[in-house]
Image (cartoon, coloured by chain):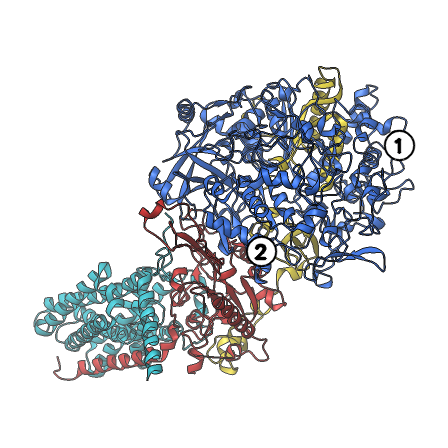
Amino acid sequence: MAECHPVGFQWVMEAKRKGATIIHVDPRFTRTSVVADLHVPLRAGTDIAFLGGLVHHVLENDLDFREYVVHYTNAAAIVGEDFRDTEDLDGLFSGYDPEKQQYDPTSWQYENAPQSPAAGERDPGQPAGPAASQEPEEHESARSEQTGSGGPTVQAKPERDETLQHPRCVFQILKRHFARYTPQLVAEVCGVPEEDFLRVAKALTENSGRERTSAFCYAVGWTHHSTGVQIIRTASILQTLLGNIGRPGGGILALRGHASIQGSTDIPTLFNILPGYIPMPHAAQHRSLEEFVAEDAGSTGFWGNMDAYTVSLLKAWWGDSATADNEFRFDYLPRLTGHHGTYDTVVNQIEGRSPGYLVVGENPAVGSANGKMQRLGLANLEWLVVRDLTMIETATFWKDGPEIESGELRTEDIGTEVFFLPAASHVEKKGSFTNTQRMLQWRHQAVQPPGDARSDLQFYFELGRRIRAKLAGSTDEMDRPLLDLTWDYPTEGPLDEPDAEAVLREINGWDDSGDALSSYTQLATDGSTACGCWIYCGVYADETNQAARRTPHWEQSLVAPEWGWVWPANRRILYNRASADPDGKPWSERKKYVWWDAEQEKWVGEDVPDFVADRAPDHVPEEGATGPDALGGRDPFIMQTDGKAWLYVPTGLADGPLPTFYEPVESPVRNAAHRPQRNPALEDVAEPANPINPTESRVFPYVFTSYRLTEHHTAGGMSRTLPYLSELQPEMFVEVSPRLAEERGLEHAGWATIVTSRSAIEARVMVTARMRSLRLGEQWVEHVGLPYHWGANGLVTGDSVNDLVGIALDPNVHIQDKVGTCDIRPGRRPRGPALLDLVEDYRRRSGAHPAEEDDA
Amino acid sequence: MVPEASPDSYYGRPIIKPPTWKTPDVPLYLFLGGLAGASAVLAEGAAVTGRPDLERVARVAASAGAGLGTVALIHDLHRPERFLNMLRVLKPTSPLSVGSWILAPFSGLSAAAAASDLTGRLPRLGRAAGMGATALGPALATYTAALLANTAVPAWHDAHRELPFVFAGSGATAAGGLACMFTPTDQAGPARRMLAAGALVELAASERLTSRLGMVGEPYREGRPGRLMKAARVLTAVGGTAALLAGGRSRTVSTVAGAACVAASVLTRFGIFEAGMASARDPKYTVEPQRERLRARAAQAASTMAG
Amino acid sequence: MPTPLEWPLLRQLRGRDRLGRGAAVESGTTKRLTPRTSRADSVVDSVCPFCAVGCGQKVFVEDGRVTQIEGDPASPISRGRLCPKGSASTQLVTSDHRVTKVRYRRPHGTEWEDLDLDTAMDMIADRVVATRREYWEWEDEQGRRTRRTLGIASLGGATLDNEENYLMKKLYTAMGAVQIENQARI
Amino acid sequence: MSSSLSGPLHDVAGDAGHEDHPPRMGFFTDTSVCIGCKACEVACKEWNLVPEDGLSLSGMSYDNTQALGASTWRHVAFVEQPTGRASRTDLGMPGIGPPGGAEPPAGPGQETDSGEGGVRWLMSSDVCKHCTHAACLDVCPTGSLFRTEFGTVVVQEDICNGCGYCVPACPYGVIDIRPGDGRAFKCTLCYDRIGEGMTPACAQACPTESIQYGELDELRERAGRRLGELQEQGVDGARLYGADPDDGVGGDGAFFLLLDEPEVYGLPPDPVVTTRDLGSMWRHVGAAALGLVGVGVASFIGRRR
C-alpha cells in the first residue's frame, strides 16, 4: 500500500501512531513492510491457504464475534441436503462436470429455497459465441457475470438455526470445510512458519469484538489470480466472522490503481454490466424486459427495485421513444451469449472476427497479459483508434513491436489502419473521477487542450453525432437504437465541448417534470423517471453538482460528508447498520458510528445510515413482503437478498460456494491442500501464442510475480515519458534472492533473461535480501520479482513483463493469474529470430502447450 | 547483491563533494599567487638595495604572476562574465573574498610598478606602486593556504596550520628561483638566499604537515599526489642546495637550480591540490577522524562522570 | 537602477550585517521574489489522474498555461499530500512528450502521416458504420435475438471520467457493440 | 564574533543583519516513518524547476538518485541491512521470517533470530541542513549565498558566478555546481513559498509526515518527544542528528531522526563548520606572511652580491 498508494497510506501511519498493529503479508518486502510491525512473506498465489488458515483458527478456537455472526451473517442458514463439500468429494464441490470444467450450483442452495433462475438455470446446448469457439458450450461463468450490485438472488429467507449447531448450518459447514487449513498446512503451502502465522492469527483475533476492529487492504495481489474472487471471498468470511464489516476501522478495502477505475465499473465500460451493476441482458433468458427484471423484482432488499433502475436507465438513453408499450426500448439493448471479456476480444481479433478497435487511455501492448497475443490481435485489425497523451506502444506496435524485431511480423504485411488521436489531460477537461472509496470528485477545467487534443467526452459525442448524421434517414431497424438515442448535450467553450455537467445530470436523473432527482428511492417503474446510473442518483440533487463540493476537512467531522459525493446516497461506510448491535446500540463507545435513536425513532450517527431510515431494530417484516419492505431490523446487508452477510454463497459463483485452495495455473509444486491442482472451473484460453507451463516443471522452476513500483504508473504511458519519474527508476530490473542469484549465477546490476513458454525478456538484476527464499517442506521456492512498467517507447525503455504472462482466467470475473513459473538465466536475451528459438527450445523441453479441451 | 549497509559509508560514496575547481587553473593560480607575492617582496628589496636587474625581473614576475593568476582565476569561474561580483562584498570569512581584495589591487599596483620600471616613466609613482604591491605580496602568497584550508576537505582543512608556511616557503622558492634564472649572478644573491630560505621553510612545514596529520595526511604521501609531493621535495632540496652552494659561481647552476625550484613550487601546488581532491573522494578521510573525535568526546565525558 | 549606495559592500559597512552574510548582500531579484503561484490568473480544483486514492490537486494557471499543480490541503483524503507521480502532474500535462497532432498510419504503411482532425473523425465514423453493418448479428446460431455486432471492440475507461465512460457505454450499447472492456479486468 | 562562526547561536537571522525577522524555520525529517516514496524529490523538482539528473540504474537498492547535488535537492537514501543474520549453512531451518515472539517487534523492519536473517530497509530523505553556521555561506565570495530572514541559507542565482568555493566547504556534500549552467544550486527551503506562508514543496507532498516543516524550536521539541516514544518502544539505534546547537555547525536548520549511524545514510558523524577554525587559519596565514617578509629581509642582509 505504501508502494502503490503512498498518500492513502498516510492513514495507516496515522493508525499506527495511535497504536495500531500493521501486518504486511506479501511475497515481496516492499515499502509497506518497512513500517509494518510484521512482514510475512508467503508464496505468491497461496492467499486462500493463508486466509483459510486464519478462518480455521477463528472457528477452531471459537474466536468469532458470535453476536455479530449469529445476527448479521448467514452462519445460521441451513443448506440443502444435496450439497457436498470438498471434504466429501476430494477437493470438488457437488455439481461438477469434469468435461465442461463447470459447476452446476443447484445443490449449493439453502434448504427449501426455490431454485434461483439467476444462477441455477443452466442453458443447455447453447451455441458458442465466436470468442468461445474452442468451447462447445458456454461457460457457466458468463452467468455469474449477470448478477448485479445486489449480488445473486435468493428468493426467500433461509431456514435458520441460531444455535449454530445444525450439522447443515453454514457455520458447521464452514468449520468442516476449513478444518484442514491448519497452521501446518499453511506452512507447507505458503512457506509461512507456524509461529509467524500464529502471530498474525493472534493479532487479528485479539483485535476483534465490540471494542476493536481490523481492516484488510488489498490490490491486484489478490485479484489477479485464477482464484481471485475466492481469495477475496476468504477475506470476507474472515472479516465477517470477526465482525469487521460495516464498522469504522473495519472492512476489506480494495486499493484500485487508476483514477476512475471504480467509476468505470460503476458506469461500466465493461461487457457484462450496464450502469449501476445492472446486468447486460442475456440472449437465452432475457427476451423481454419482464423476463429481465423478473428474477430480481420482488426479492428482499433494495435490489428488489431493480426494475425501476432499469426502466429509468432506458428512459435516460432512449427518452421519449422509450415507452411502456415498447418495454422502454429494452429490445434496443444488445444481448450477451457468453463472456466477452478483453481476452475473448483478443482471440476474436487474432481469429479475424473483430476488425475494429478503439483503445482509450489504456496500453494493452504493455499492460495486458500475454503481450504477444495483444499485438497479434492489433496486427490483425482493419482499423485501430488509439487515444492517449503520448505515443504509447499500442499505437506503434506495427513499427517497433517485439514481433517486428523477432521477425514474426513485418510492418509492410500489417494491414491495420491506425489513427492516433491526442487526448486532453485531466486539467484540460472537466468531469468526475470516482475514487477507490466510491467517492465522486469533480475536476474543473483549468486550460484548453493543446493542438488536436480533445477530451474523450468530446470524441465520443462527436463520433456519435457523425454516426447519427451518416445514418440519418435510415429505415433499417438495426439503426434505430442509434437514431432514437438521446444525444443532444449542450456544448460550450471555444472547442464546442459537450457540457460534462449536463452528462452528470443525466447520470443523476430527473423526474417527469425534468427536475433533478435526489435519491434512487425516487426511481419509478412507469417511465416517469430517467436515470443514467441509479447508484449515482443524488450526485446532482438540488440541481447542484454534489461531486464538486469541497468543504475543507478542518471544517467538518472526520467522516467529511461535505467533500465530494459518495455513492450510494453519500454514504461513506457501506452496511453501516452493522456498526450497531442487534438492538441498535453502538457496539462500544470507541466504535460508535451509526445507531438507533429511540426518541427520534430513526437511525442517526456520523454517516448516512445505510438502512431504511426509520426501521426499528426489532422490526420483523411481514410474511411475503418484498424489496426494502422485506428487510428486518437486524438485516444490515440491505443489498443482499436476505439482508445477511454471506459466509457461504449458495448461488452466484462459478467455482464453489466456499473458497478452496488450488494452486495457480502455473506452479512449481503440487497442491498440498486438495487433489485438484488448479481451479477446477478455470477458464482456459486456447491460442497457439498462449501455452501454459506444466506443473512442477524443472524447466520452469521459479515463481514469477509482477508488480508496481511507487515511481511508475501501470504500463508506463504516464510515467516513462516524464523525466522526474523516469530518473527515479530508469531501467527494467528483476529482483531475486541471494540464494537464487547464487543458484543461477546472477550478478547484481548485471543482466538476466527471464523465460516462460510465452516469451523471454531481459532485465537488470537486483539481488536483494528483500526477496526471500521460502521453504515448503523439503523444497525451496524462489520468486522472481518483476516490476512491469516498461516498454519500447518513452524516456526510459525496457522489455515488457506482460509478455511473459500466460492467460488462464478466473471463471467469475475473467481475470488472469499474475503469477506463473519461469526460468531465469544470466545475460541478455537473444535478438531477432534467435529469441523465438530460445523460447521454442524451452517449450519443447518443458512440454508446454496451449490449452486444449481436455486439459483439466 | 545490493551492497550491504556499511558502517563507514553509503555505498562507498564520498560524503563531501570534491571541489569543482579545475586543473590546471587552480593549482596554477596557487603557484602564480605565491610567485607574484614573493616576487614583489624581492623586487622591493632589490630596489632598496640597488639591484636594478633583479628588481626588473622580480617586478615583471610579480606583475605577470598576478596577471596570469587573475586569468587563471577567472577562467576557473563557471560564470566568468560575473567575475566582478567578487567585489560585491568583503567577507573576512571567505579567503576567496579577502583574496580578491588583495589580488585586485596587487595586480594593478604590480603592473604599474613593472610598467614604470620597464618604460622608465613615472618612476616615483612606479616606486610607490611597487611598495604597495610589496605590502600586499606576502598576503597574496599565503592567503591561498586559507583558501584551501577553509573547506571541509580533510587533507586541506586539517593542514590549516602548516599550509600557510608551505605556501610562503613555496612562493619564496619560486620567486627566488625565477629571479635566479633571469638575473645575472652578481645581482642574484638575495634571490638565491630567498630560494634557499623558502626551500627550508617549505620542506620543514611539509614535513610537519604530513607527520601531524596522520591518517588524513595519507594522500600527501600516497598515489599521484604523493609522487608529486615527493618530486617537489627532491627538486626543492636539490635546487636549494645547488643554488646556495654553487649558484653564485655559475650562471648555469643558478639558472638550473632556479628552474628546479620553480618547477618544485608548481609540483607542490599540484600535489597539495590533488591530495585534497583524493581526501575528498574517499569517505574514510571524512568519517574516521570525525568518529575518532566522537569517541574521544565520549571517553572524556565518561571520565568526567567517573571523576 | 541601483545606486552606488546599494553596493552590498557599503550596505555591509553601514548596517548590522557586518560580515556580509545576510541582509547586506540580498540582491534586488531576491527582494522581489514571490512564489509563481501568487501570479496565477486562476487556481482550479482538480483530482490527481494517477491512482484511485483521489488526492485533491490545485492547478495554477497563468496566461493560459499550467504553471503548477500541487496537493490541495483542504482534501480530507489527501490533506495536501501527493506521491511522486501526483507530484509530477505539472510535468505530465506540460510534457514535451505529449503528442498534440493527429497521427495516421495507412494499412501496410511504414511511417506515420499527418491527418486533419476533422478528416480523421469522419474516417473513423465511416469505419464504425461500415464495420457495424458488415458484422451485424440479429441472432445467434440458435436463433436467439442478439441485436449486436462483435466487429467493434473497445478498451479503456479506468483513466477517464465518469461522464466519458457514460457516453461510451451509451453509444456503444446503442451501436450494438458488446465487447467493451477496461483496465478493471486487466 | 566567535558565536557568529561556531557554537550555539540563537538568533541566526539577527546575526545576519535581519531586523524584526520571523522565527527560524526548518525541517525535521523523521526517517522512522519514511516510506521512501520519493514524493519529496519530485515535488521539489516540480516547484523549483530543477532539471532531470541522469537516467542510469545505480544498483543501490531503490536509490537511483544517489546523492544530493545541483539538480537534486532532496535525496532519498535506501539502505538494505540484514538483521539477525545467520550463516548460509543455517538456511535449512524450516521457513523464514520473524520469530514467534509474543509481541510484534516494536519498530520498523523485521527482526529474526531463526534461520535466514531478516532484512531492514532504511530510508531517509536527505536535504540541505541549513546550518546555524553554514560554511557554504561563509566562504561564498560574492554574497550570492546568504542567510534569509527565516534563518535559512539560500543561493541567489542572479549573483552566483560559479566560483565553486561553497562546494568543498559544505561538510555534508550538499551544494554543487550544475554542469552546463555553471552556478551553484541547492535546497532553498522554498524561500519563495515560505515567504508567503506556504509550506515547502517537499514537506507539503510528504505522505507520511516524515518531512515536517515549521519553527525550528517547535520542531526540536517535537523531535525530542518522538525520540522518547521510539526509545520507549525499544527501537534500536534511534537518534537525532543535527538537532544539537552545541554540535560542530551550531545545529542544523534541517535535522533528522535516524535509525542507525549517520555514516550509514551517507552523513558525516561529527561535521564541523570549517570557519570554526577561521581565526587560527588567518593567524597562521598572517604568521606565514610575516615570515615571508622576514625571508625577504633576510635575503638582502649580508653579503652584497
Using the image, tell me which numbered label, if any, was put on residue A446.
Answer: none
Q: Which residue is drawn at 57% across and 46% down?
A: A60
Q: In this view, does B246 lie above or below A588?
A: below
**Going by the image, does A846 lie left or right of A268?**
left
Q: What element carries label 2?
A: helix
Residue furthest out toward the right: A513
Q: Name the residue under label 1.
A: A320
State the hue of chain A: blue
Q: Mark 2 points at which residue?
A: A206
State the hue of chain D: red
**Image spot of residue B127 (x, y percent):** 30, 80
Residue A256 seen from this side: no
How crowded pointer 2 is (Cα within 10 Å; few <14, some 14-19, many 20+) is rated as some
Q: Earlier in the sequence, mark 1 or mark 2?
A: 2
Q: Is residue B60 above or below residue A830?
A: below
Q: How far apart are marks 1 and 2 (CA)?
A: 59 Å
Please tell me in which quadrant of the rendered image residue C5 appears. Answer: bottom right
**Going by the image, does B150 lie left or right of B44?**
right
State the hue of chain B: cyan
CB-based contact (under 8 Å), mark 1 and mark 2: no
Are callouts 1 and 2 both on one chain? yes
How crowded pointer 1 is (Cα within 10 Å; few <14, some 14-19, many 20+) is rated as few
Please tell me in which quadrant of the rendered image residue B154 appears. Answer: bottom left
